[in-house]
Image (cartoon, rainbow, N blue to C red):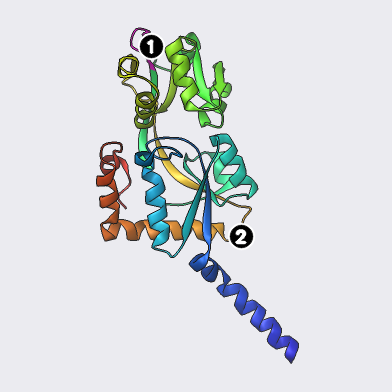
Amino acid sequence: MEMKKTAILFLVSAIIMPAAVFASDVAKFALGEWAPYTSEYEANAKFLEEIVAEAFKLEGIAVKYDYFPWKRSYVYVKQGKYDGTFPWNTTPEREIDFHINKIPLFQDDSVYFHLKNNPFDWNTIEDLKNYKVGVTIGYKQDAYYKEKGVSAEIVANEEQNFLKILAGRIDVYQTSKLAGYATINRLFSPADASKFTHHPRAPETDIYYILFSKNRPGDRELADKFDSGFKKLKASGEYDRICEKYRDVSTCGQNLNKE
């Protein structure tokens, strides 16, 4: 009889454990530098960090952010060393390797950056073979360029790509329009920043989510908790307050999903 009671108590504890963990635990995120959305150094470039923290707060969950190169953040979450990483768009591979929340964080045009005095034009991916192309390790363009036979120089972060464009070492680099100009304005003097432009035709509009580990207990539920908190954040009006706070460096009013 005593053994039966113990077994029943164990099953009950297992059922209620996730709720208890989320009420008191800390969700750990591995991020990279991608102003104005995430930043280790710039206080006014943590737009998504604040959104995610406030959404989880409404579910009784605290967050902790650590910063690494993006590729390392991705790998750490996949290995289960961290709960999640953001912002990332989805790919078939990521849908297999991670739990992904359902409500998008935001969407943004991904464009080709180049110098004004170095004309660039494209109609298909084949046209990129006529240019020196840069790519950041871990970004989906890396695999896509290899698949399409486009030779691209790989570097560790976005900053290096923009430095290489200014130095004439590459011609073109694709990234978020908003994040790209934020990086340019942070890296360069106004005179040098004014030398950059982007092609008006966006190759894609990216929709970004949080990738949650499949190798940490409870992270599927953690993804659902974020979606729940995100909905509450929007309904409360706090979401709009954060948008207003970052109005000079974000387009959340236009681009973030309003579900």
Q: Secondary structure at mark 2?
A: loop
Closest to the observer, 103 or 78: 78
Mark sitting on residue 201: none
Q: Which residues are magenta?
A: 114-121
Is there CB contact under 8 Å for labels 2 and 1? Answer: no
Residue at screen point 41% across, 60% down: 57
Q: Residue furthest bottom?
A: 1
Circle 1 sits in a helix, a strand or a loop, which is it?
Answer: loop
Q: Estimate the x, y position of residue 209 in percent, counting from the top left.
A: 45, 45
Q: Earlier in the sequence, mark 2 or mark 1?
A: 1
Residue designated by label 2: 217
Q: Separation of disc 2 and disc 1 at Cα? A: 48 Å
Using the image as rendered, state which of residue 40 and residue 166 is in the foreground: 40
Quadrant in which residue 87 is drawn? top left
| Predominant SS along the magenta part | loop
Query: On the rendered image, what quadrant is the N terminus found in?
Result: bottom right
x and y percentages locating residue 83 in the rendered image: 56, 52
Mark 2 neighbour class, 10 Å CA radius: few under 14, some 14 to 19, many 20 or more: few
| Tag of residue 120 | 1
Identify the residue at image location x=34%, y=40%: 44
In terms of depth relative to the viewer, which is nearer, 218 or 73?
Answer: 73
Which residue type carries mark 2? Pro
Residue 142 visible (yes or no): yes
